[in-house]
Amino acid sequence: MGKGREKIKGTMRGQLSRLIFAAMVPFLAMTIVLLGLLVLFNYEYTTTLKNADTAAEFNFDFKTTVDLEMYYYVVGSKDDTDIPYEYVSSAEAILHRLETTTEQSDNLWRIGKMLDMCKRLRESIDRIVASEGYDSRMTQLDNDIRTITTLIDRYMHAYIYDEILTLSKLQREINGRITMTIVTTAIITAALIFVILIYSRRVSFKVSEPIRALVEKTLKLGGGDFDVEPVGTGIVEIKALDDGFNDMSGRMNELLDRVKKDQEVLRRAEMGLLQAQINPHFLYNTLDSIIWLAESRRDADVIRLVTNLSTFFRNSLSKGQDIITIADEEKQVCSYLEIQQIRYSDIMEFESDIPEALYPFSIPKLTLQPLVENALYHGIKNKRGRGSIRISGRFDGNDILLVVEDDGVGMTPEVLAKLRAAINDDKVGKGFGLVNVQKRLKLYCGDEYGLTFESTPGGGASATVRIPKQIKQVS
């Protein structure tokens, strides 16, 4: 346990934690005290202010209004519906609210007296209403009503005066506490800043030299020099970072070797595909068709066949480019199909329906031709009667799907399973073109992209190419 603690002390995290702890504890304690004082004073101030606001709702014309309304009633200018009971009820409601929030004993006494006076005022109004004769009513108005309203008015003014005095006192106390807190905070902050500056210089010195060495090592790695020396440091994090640099150097060497191998595999795959395009049987059969058409004096067909053959090989080479546009790939595969259609005009027809919106996007060259060749030789030729090959494309989110479909003999589930396994097996020799297409798609685009196949016996087959909208060429 003790050794574990010693190890923590040697880390940047441990040193910074102690620094933060030393800086935060005084601030935290001061903040708690300050917040406590602020909450206490805020409660007292808010309560007193609320009392003053509530008292302000009291009708300051209460005496004048009640006296005048009762005078009109006595002299007979108003009927029973205009007796000012509602003013008394409103005053009682405000006094009850003040009774629940007032803390000063003097003001609580005043509220109690005012509630009693409101009760007496209501009783006096009832007596005036019950009595008869102008003189009797006027005497009660002078002796009871006006005396009670005068007392209520005085008590309410005294109540508000005391609450305002309390607010003023609290304000002075808060100002004094704030001044004291500001001075104390300034002194503690200055002391903490001084301590932090001293400690931070020590930490900076311990960290700066190893980091400078790491910078030099990084520059060496960036320059291609992977023969690096360990950095001497006692800080655990920098030591771990240095070890990570050393491991990264070794992995970069391994990665470079792997990239070289992938490039070699890719070049071999491309060479295999190119050789497949220029296989002797295809070239021999095409030239034989040209001779046969020439002997038959079908000059237009000869021109069309030679033009397609030229276009086919020109697009296959693509000026040494590995990535071409979908438009160029469509031209290449259509040239191939038109050449084959001369030989297989009685059994094959084809259609290309790739939207022009896909044309600007890129695709590894020689992707579609092996698929249509597979559809022709394994699907259409083994079918009785005519067959068709259709090429289509569409967007699928951030991807592009290109589909080669045929209505040939299709595949049994067992044959389809073997094909799906074979295209991902580097050791499989059969179906070389499809294996190389799958390998190139994954190298160029990523493991989530490539070929998928669907088929049913007698129902034809479809091969789908999934590629991203943008392809970064492997260098």
Image (cartoon, grey):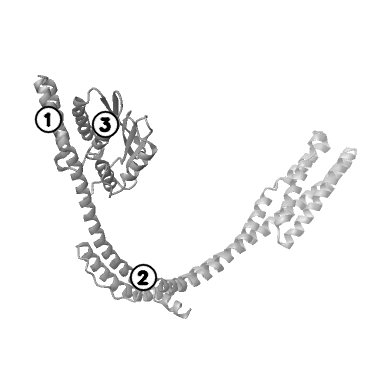
- Of the pair 264 and 402, the residue shown nearer to us: 264
Q: Residue at x 15, y 39 (%)?
A: 317
Q: Give the spatial CA distance, label 2 vs label 3.
A: 63 Å
Q: Which mark is residue 454?
A: none
Q: Whole-percent x and y of residue 356?
A: 27, 30
Q: Whole-percent x and y of residue 105?
A: 74, 62
- Of the pair 357 and 255, the residue shown nearer to us: 255
Vertical placement of residue 257 versus 399, above or below: below
Q: Label 2 neighbourhood size at 10 Å, few (<14), some (14-19), many (20+)?
A: some
Q: Which residue is mark 2?
A: 237
- Nearer the observer, disc 2 or disc 3? 3
Q: Is residue 25 visible?
A: yes
Tell me where residue 461 sits by quadrant: top left
Q: Residue at x 19, y 26 (%)?
A: 343
Q: Which mark is residue 376?
A: 3
Q: Which mark is residue 287?
A: 1
**Of the image marks 2 and 3, the number of the one nearer the N terminus:** 2
